[in-house]
Amino acid sequence: MKAQVSRLLTHSFVDGPGNRAVIFLQGCQMRCLYCHNPQTQALCDGCGLCIGGCPGEALSAGTPLRWDPARCQGCDRCIAVCPSCADPRATWYGVGDLLAWLRPLAPFLSGVTVSGGEPMLQAEFLAAFLPAVRQAGLSTMIETNGLIEPEPLLPWLDGALVDLKVWDDDRHRALTGTGNAAVKATIRRLAAQGKLVEVRLPIIAGFSDDAAHVQAAAGFVAAIDPAIPVRLLRFRPHGTVGPAAGWAPPADGLIDQFVTIARSAGLITVTRSR
Amino acid sequence: MRNPVTMAAYEDLKTGLTAEKVGELRSWVSGVLRDTSLTPDQRRATLAVGAAKVLPHLPYSDAACQALAEGTVCMLGEVPLPFWPRYTAPDYARLLRQGSEYLRLKPARDLHDALAGLLSAYQYSATVTLEPVWLGNLDTLLEPYFDSVPEPEARRAVRSFWTVVSRLFPSSFVHANIGPGETRMGRLLLELDRETGEPVNTSFKYAPGVTPEGFAREAARCAMGASKPYFHNHALSAADWGEEYAIASCYNLMPVGGGIHTLVRVNLGKVATRAESPAHMLEAAIPEAAALLCEIIAARCAFLGAEAGFLEHSFLVKEGLLRPGAFTAYAGVFGLAEAVNGLMGGARYGHDAAADRFAIDIIAKLAECVAATPMPFCAGSGGKAVLHAQVGIDSDTGYTPAARIPPGDEPDLYDHLRTVSPHDRHFTGGVSNIFEFEATAADNPQAVLDIVRGAFSLGCRNLALGPSGGDLIRVTGYLMRRSDLTRRAEGQIVRGDGALFGSAFFVNQPEHLHRRVRSV
């Protein structure tokens, strides 16, 4: 069994507790306007539009396309021209491949976080991979958009970090293409199981940068358990495409105000990104 | 701008000051005593070094003199005839227990006695910087007195002590140790250290599995704010020195109650220019250089031990606070990167496996040569000198400190640690490598600890970790305030030798201000 992987990161201090290796899986059901890794949204359908523009001639026909890492210059032109938000360089890895990648990193790690894309879209692979990660003495976490409950993975999952992108369902739909009822259910479910590591609230102008929104989202989490850590993520245009690339980050002071609001909603641990 | 202790031009190895150089000496003295950018103490210390340099060096062999003249072997701020040890680590626990006849101190009965006793004794510790290089394992030293006064009073007293230490000894080579066990005093010291942000050096003796993780996380949090403490691999150094060891000055190891007579350095980059090939470097150039290095160290140890009379006459020895049998000497090493890169025909240290293997062979060979040479007055380490990873001064331009990877050429974090850590078991006398992280690493101290634990598992002895752009910058082995860089550049007076040396270092080697910042 294999997973399609967009990117492997050998160390991260921001994807759960301690230092973690991060595996970004390819494919997501949401289509967030502000997505910072839009090339991870879809699987390559082999249309071939990117082949001609590749300066290193690293791409060739096939479904998905064939990619030669030795010739790749890392210029990202392929993902810039992809009409379906895919990445011809995404690579299939087996459980053994990823374990081999992890082995020399393990002494430096608290654990592994599987992110994306949306990791739950490849839950079957995770059901095979996560127990092996545990076996290697590392903790297991996922970063999920919350649309799919990670119920079947819970025996091998130490925790999950969930994005609650917008509190209001209509705005959530406008921003991501889907409603958020399932996300809220996943948050409740994970909290009940003691596996909710962090809820992230992106602060995006026009969608989630008002006090009422923060109040509602923070109140929702606090009502479940005031000890659940919440992190406010200040929108940054870096990495986004389309109109979002022109959106301004919310003012720094505004995020601080929201931290105060979230705390007064009852939350004990509220942090923010810079 | 010049370094105030730059060797005066009149120095001649074999004759010392000659008649025709007297004029130069006079004008140098005249310049120093009028130097408005130095405090009176700094001027006096500079003049004292200059005065001691009018004498010829010890009678080294011609080959050794040539090595000194070429800089293949060199010293660091030491005068031709050493008359007191370079570093000492007095047994302060004993001082507090027994008091001191010479200092007219009674055994300490409470925290105030203990702090006053330490502050009194520090003044007399007799080192190359004229200031104490070791303050003791302050947590275990003071913990027994914590309950002798009410807690708020204890906290205030220790805070005042820390203020006095940093103001009385504004040297960046003053070093306090904490750990490996958790104590209330240890926590208090970490808290004060983070809050006050003075350039006093601190080391955290860390033993994963023994040191409580919560305590270690406090140390990591402190490091991500104040660029200290060092994370020191306690298991490794306790195996080399026994449980009672001191980390002094930059990160220099010695037994408690012992000291280091002298430090003489070998510039591996220059040694490599004499080698025709990597094999020739290992078989001939290193053994030859090591022999000259050891000859000079031995002569200096013999002079200190037999002629200078420090060990027989110091009250520190008479009262058992220093033990002659716990002294040794350092064989300093720098310029490994240049040696490797110069001989490997394109393969780079830190980037190519073959280069890294050659680097390991070089250090192992040097360690073998030094360990095979008997050294007088070095019973503190079995009658042999110990290897010290030497990070150098402003004038070492063109040569990378110790076994480090040149700033600007650093590989990824793990590869970097994998490259440098295998050397550390040979550096019994101390070593460190510097890693700067994005400032937000402070939000995740556990991650910092994970990196430390991983490094220790590779044999790493000591890590300097800090935030990029912090107020305190790790220069080489010591700290200075970033703001003192500007102040010094404008010719203003700065407090402390760290600011003086550090400013000169960064002027000559600005690349060290631009170390690779590790992403989080």
Image (cartoon, rainbow, N blue to C red):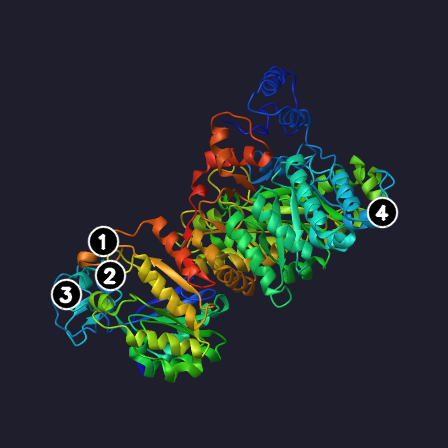
* N-terminal label among 3 and 1: 3
Three-letter amino acid code of the residue under disc 4: Pro
**Label 3 vs label 1: CA separation?**
27 Å
- What's the CA distance linking mark 3 and mark 4? 81 Å
- Secondary structure beneath disc 1? loop
Chain name for mark 4: B
Q: What chain does mark 2 sit on?
A: A
Q: Residues within 10 Å of mark 2 (few under 14, many from 20)?
A: many
Q: Specify the quadrant that holds the C terminus of chain B.
A: bottom left
Amino acid at pointer 1: Trp
Pointers 3 and 4 within a single chain: no
Q: Which residue is mark 2?
A: A34
Which disc, if any, is residue A50? 3
| Distance from the alpha carbon under mark 1 to that under mark 4 | 69 Å
Which amino acid, mark 3?
Cys
- Nearest to the eye among marks 3 and 2: give it: 2
**Residue B107 shows in this picture:** yes
The residue that label 4 is drawn on is B107
Question: Is the residue under label 2 in contact with that under label 3 (CB below 8 Å)?
Answer: no
- Label 3: how many Cα within 10 Å (few below 14, some 14–19, many 20+): many
Kindly identify which numbered label has been placed on residue A247.
1
